[in-house]
Image (cartoon, rainbow, N blue to C red):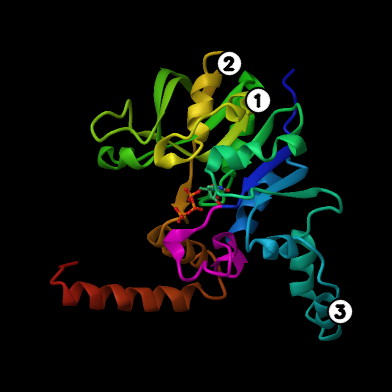
Amino acid sequence: MVKPIRKAVFPVAGLGTRFLPATKAMPKEMLTIVDRPVIQYVVDEAKAAGVEHFIFVTGRNKGVIEDHFDIQVELEHTLEQRGKLDTLGILRRDMPKAGHTSFTRQQQPMGLGHAVLCAQELVGDEPFALLLPDMIMKAPRGCLSQMMEVYQQRGGNIVALEEVPEKDTHKYGVVQTGEVRETDYEILGMIEKPAQGHAPSNLILSGRYILQPEIFKYLASQPPGAGNEIQLTDAMIQLKNDQDFSGVKFTGQTFDCGSKSGFLMANVAFGMERGDIAPNVADTIREIVQNYDDRNGIEA
Ligand code: UTP
């Protein structure tokens, strides 16, 4: 029997420089996809996978994330008075149970690995899920749920994988795979941002992890790596010497909402799922694309 995954960590302390000036005073995790903040999609994914406790590693300017997961008494009262019960229902449905969220601060953005280390006291000595809010997954069955299935069979550490064109591998953590099994890949090695042409595969770490608590030991002694940041991948490489890692290639669509194009595409994709706005959006997008093609001499 593997130990259950009860807790999930959400590192939300990055500076979000790619979205400046939007993120000067507002965290990028609160940017909206249609009408829900990015962070809500990731919390929903964790909830659907059975996670009970949500741990946020926040930083400067991130207080609004804490407010988002709290009750707004006046707002709820006003919605009730105005008969906006559907909206009120959505707010209540999204609310985590009392006492089931924790917030801790990463005082300086020293990298993803360091942000995860900041959650050590709150996670304690048990395996946990780690979800990067940058990556939004769209699928009938969430990415973490798909990973949980493999975890039930194999235990150990599980990472989500995604295929990218070979020319892009240098931007990501890349894995070296061994045996290809029915549900997952054996992971033989990992490397963070390999030099161009030196990646061991085109399968990248795509922002979802199930990790054993021994990862903290390696994070605590990790010197800064790529980009002068404490890298999670470097600590996982060390943990790999002691424990098994399996990789799950997620079935669904992934949007890198840390990039402007990924964020825009996520808005279109999720917007098109909404019956109330989809027809309008589709018509306008067709027109915009047609104008773009005409201007650039692109034939359909
Ligand atoms: P990114 O690499 O996207 O960094 O972090 P960033 O600073 O947020 O964004 P840019 O590159 O400046 O635009 C991936 C995830 O790790 C978190 C981020 O909040 C994001 O969810 N992170 C990163 C931290 O919590 N702390 C850090 O020191 C770095």
Q: Is residue 45 above or below residue 15?
A: above
On the image, the x and y values in percent for residue 99 come to 86, 50
Look at the numbered discs 1 and 2 and tell me whether their residues touch, using CB distance below 8 Å. yes
Query: What is the spatial separation of the Cα atoms under label 3 and label 1, in whole angstroms?
Result: 43 Å
Residue type marked 3: His
Image quarter in which the N terminus is found = top right
> In the structure shown, which secondary structural element does the residue marked by tag 3 occupy?
helix
Residue shown at the point (43%, 65%) measured from the top left: 264
Label 2 Cα crowd, 10 Å radius (few <14 / some 14-19 / many 20+): few
Q: Nearer the viewer, residue 91 or 221?
A: 221
Query: What is the spatial separation of the Cα atoms under label 1 and label 2, in whole angstroms?
Result: 9 Å
Look at the numbered discs 3 and 2 and tell me whether their residues touch, using CB distance below 8 Å. no
Residue type marked 2: Gln
Label 1 Cα crowd, 10 Å radius (few <14 / some 14-19 / many 20+): many
Q: Which residues are magenta?
A: 14-37
Label 3 Cα crowd, 10 Å radius (few <14 / some 14-19 / many 20+): few
Q: Earlier in the sequence, mark 3 or mark 1?
A: 3
Which mark, residue 243?
A: 2
On the image, the x and y values in percent for residue 59 come to 63, 55
Residue type marked 1: Gln
Q: Is residue 103 above or below residue 30?
A: above
Q: Residue furthest toward the left? A: 297
Residue shown at the point (76%, 31%) measured from the top left: 124
Task: Give the residue number, with chain letter if any, for mark 3.
Answer: 77
Which mark, residue 212?
A: 1
